[in-house]
């Protein structure tokens, strides 16, 4: 594991995963792109404009890939949460990934059982809830330390913690 970290392999993980995501989306958009569809049967007297995804297989491949990235991120961060370090990010990352995964696991059955405007509202709510949770779980403790706990960010106390720990 140490050899992987020293070799610079973590620097290539994000570009490789992003390239895989772009490939999935590019193949989906190139073969069967979504189009605008109308639904006049869901609500009487109203025509609902919605996005028809055409290829459900491609949609679920993209969604499954994002889910697997979140699951791998949670799996890697979970054992690292107990590491002793003054600035251990794994605790915050573990909780944020757990919240992210739980939002999207509850989203899937609800999304499958809704139609029309409620479906769009569910998509927007899930995106906002997972984004707010990620930002809140990762950055709220940092803002608390910076704004309210000035004693934790002073250099002499940080040096004392490092030297006395050994």
Image (cartoon, helix red, strand yellow):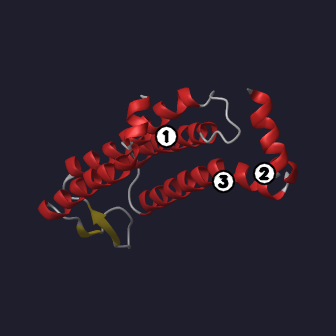
* Residue, disc 1: 101
Residue plotted at (87% across, 49% down)? 151
For label 2, the SS is helix
Quadrant in which the C terminus appears = top right
How far separated are the C-alphas under marks 2 and 1? 26 Å
User: Could you tell me residue 11's position as x and y percent?
Assistant: 39, 49
Check residue 139 in the rendering and tell me which mark sits there, or answer none. Answer: 3
Which quadrant would residue 40 be assigned to in this image? bottom left
Earlier sequence position, callout 3 versus callout 1: 1
Q: Helix, strand or loop at disc 1?
A: helix
Whichever of labels 3 and 2 marks the residue nearer the N terminus, that label is: 3
Task: Please identify the residue farthest to the left as the structure is shown.
Answer: 31
| Residue 98: image location, x then y, percent | 55, 37
In the image, residue 53 sits, relative to residue 82, either above or below, namely: below
Q: Secondary structure at mark 3?
A: helix
Res. 145 mark: 2
């Amino acid at each position: 594991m140490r050899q992987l970290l020293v070799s610079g392999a973590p620097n290539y993980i994000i570009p490789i995963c992003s390239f895989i995501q772009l490939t999935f989306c590019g193949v989906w958009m190139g073969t069967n792109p979504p189009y605008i569809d109308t639904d006049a049967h869901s609500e009487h007297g109203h025509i609902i404009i919605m996005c028809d995804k055409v290829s459900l297989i491609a949609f679920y491949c993209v969604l499954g890939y994002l889910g697997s990235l979140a699951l791998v991120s949670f799996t890697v961060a979970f054992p690292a949460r107990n590491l002793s370090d003054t600035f251990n990010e794994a605790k915050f990352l573990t909780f944020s990934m757990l919240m992210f995964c739980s939002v999207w696991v509850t989203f899937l059955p609800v999304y499958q059982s809704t139609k029309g405007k409620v479906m769009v509202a569910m998509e927007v709510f899930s995106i906002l809830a997972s984004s707010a949770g990620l930002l809140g779980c990762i950055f709220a403790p940092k803002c608390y330390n910076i704004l309210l706990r000035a004693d934790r960010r002073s250099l002499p106390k940080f040096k004392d913690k490092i030297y006395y720990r050994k």
